[in-house]
Amino acid sequence: MSVKATGVSERTQGAPNNGSPTVRSVLWLSLRILGLRTLRGITNLTRPIPKLTSRVASSELSKVAGHSSQLRTAGVAAESAFEEGKIQNLRLVAKALDGLWMPAGSTFSFWRQVGRCSRLKGYVDGRQLQEGCLVPAIGGGICQLSNALYDVALQAGFEILERHSHTRVVPGSAAEVGRDATVAWNHIDLRWRATVDSRLQVRLTGTRLEVSLWTGSPAREPAPERKRSVPLPTVSSIGACGACGEVSCHLFAKGVREVEAVQTAVVVDEMWPEFDAYLATLPATEKEIFMPLDGARRNRSAYAWKTDGYSRVHEALFLTLLRSFRSRRLAQQGAARQRAKLAASSELARHFAKRLSPHVRHLVVTQELLPFLWREGALGGRTFDVLMTRLPMAELQARLDEALARHPERQLLGDFRAPNDIISAESDALRAAAHLVTPHRDIARGDRRRILLDWCLPVATSIEAGRVVAFPGPTISRKGAYEVREAMQRLGLTIRPMGRDLETGEFWSGIPLSRPSEDRHWLDGVGVVVQPAILEDRPRRLLEAIACGVPVVATAACGVEGLPGVTLVSAADVDSLVSAIEAALQAGTA
């Protein structure tokens, strides 16, 4: 392994400064940096380095190098704003580097992959070492990641082409053991040549930065630590703007600022009353909410989240209107509709991710937006809870695959599968979540992190009992429509289907029908409500029946287990379904 460690960083950052930075010293430094950037720009044009691309993780890869470091170390309140800014910058760089595929012989360049840090890209003020001081700078703090990258490249035995050390040692940093690598656009770069095909993984947990290298080859002998021949000044020589008393320094006013009060953000989509009630119980500290639109103010019940107690309410009005327009042009069921829903959620998550304050430490996120916020890097460096509205995609699709194997003729069971990268992102995010919040009894079953909410039952309505069997779902296999049809054929009862005929035409042919009418409640004349579903995310019709005292026959997948009047049956078990319907009707006439 060869290492080219030049002294550019020391030349551009200047000699150790015994006093505060002056306007003259900063101007002279800026002129030198401009010259070096110009030279590097010419070199990049004449000898360009190809940009590497990402690649989905393979189960055949094994981890050969890893580095972990703590995200928050500042003990001074005035410095916490810069530290949260650093973490925001790390989120953006991690997004650019995570999943990067490096073929054997390829060259990695930090700045070729990341590009220039700017406010337009979402970078904020973090701490940067300049002239012996920790000063605020756009993109400041990303050296924590370049340190980690250098360390894993050494462990993997890669050929280091360019690396620059810092001119000061911050306690606890990689500079203490000579395994640091500073970067500054574009003249101070970190470059290496991969010796084997490898994949880079860069993640931020709630408290740590995790970097690792994965290859299909056995791990190579780790490179020895690089010891410094000349000791560098330690933190005792470093001033930090947030804690520095040099009020005459021209950087002081720029460096000291109030820390934003917002510490918690709620990111939601369609309103669930159970989640709305839960959010009202969150601590009354400063918090903000992101939602498609303010439904309470705009009279849209689908988004009528309570906004009392939030310091700020953020909307995505244009995206919500666009999503509604697109939805009306699609069929009620099918792959095209599912793809459109995922695309809309991705757009909404990207919109909200760009507007999250760097100072938000905790998030409460709806599951629809979770995988996309994860891919945007918005969850890194934060703790977060998930409002679970359905099964995880991996489990959901596994249930559909199992049912399709039993009934290959039921084509709607296999009409759509989410892309693997979205499934993987959701799975990774769910593993990292602090809590999984849901009223659904089947979702997150057995998970110790689950917070189980009570279902919000609607107001009971006076109805007239009867012997009609109501089926809330559309005629698709995953809602149990085929089993209900067979049960009705055996029993000779009247069915009241509440959904559309989607699976085949004339689905209920030969079975007495009682269609719902506008002048009567849908439960009038109903003796039992049945839904032997494989999947059911929002059992609102079942909850309405429970509130009105109408017996319910359903599967555990419907999520209403344990509620009064509910009888559970197994999916695809027509015999038990018939018995449960008969028992419910007999009890109603007793």
Image: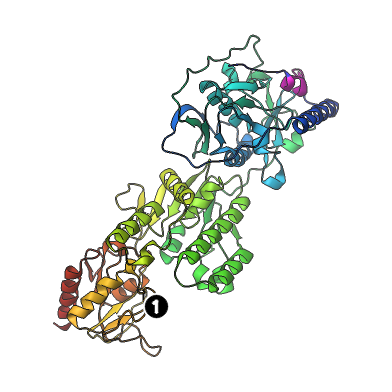
Give the amino acid type for the residue marked by disc 1 in the picture: Arg
Tell me if residue 117 comes above or below residue 22 in the rendering.
below
The location of residue 101, given as percent across then percent down, is: 55, 36
Q: Residue furthest top?
A: 229
Q: Is residue 16 magenta?
A: yes
Q: Residue furthest front?
A: 409
- Quick check: 303 left or right of 513? right
- Quick check: 145 left or right of 213? right
- Quick check: 350 left or right of 251? left
- Quick check: 125 left or right of 202? right
Magenta segment boundaries in residue numbering:
8-18
- Quadrant of the rendered structure where residue 323 is? bottom right
Which quadrant of the rendered structure holds the N terminus?
top right
The location of residue 9, given as percent across then percent down, is: 72, 22
- Residue under the point 76% across and 37% down: 253
The location of residue 488, given as percent across then percent down, is: 22, 79
The residue lying toward the viewer, choosing from 34 and 437, is: 34
Q: Is residue 303 magenta?
A: no
- Residue 441 showing in the rendered view: no
The location of residue 445, given as percent across then percent down, is: 31, 53
Judged from the image, the secondary structure of the residue bearing numbered disc 1 is loop
The residue wearing badge 1 is 500
Which quadrant of the rendered structure holds the C terminus?
bottom left
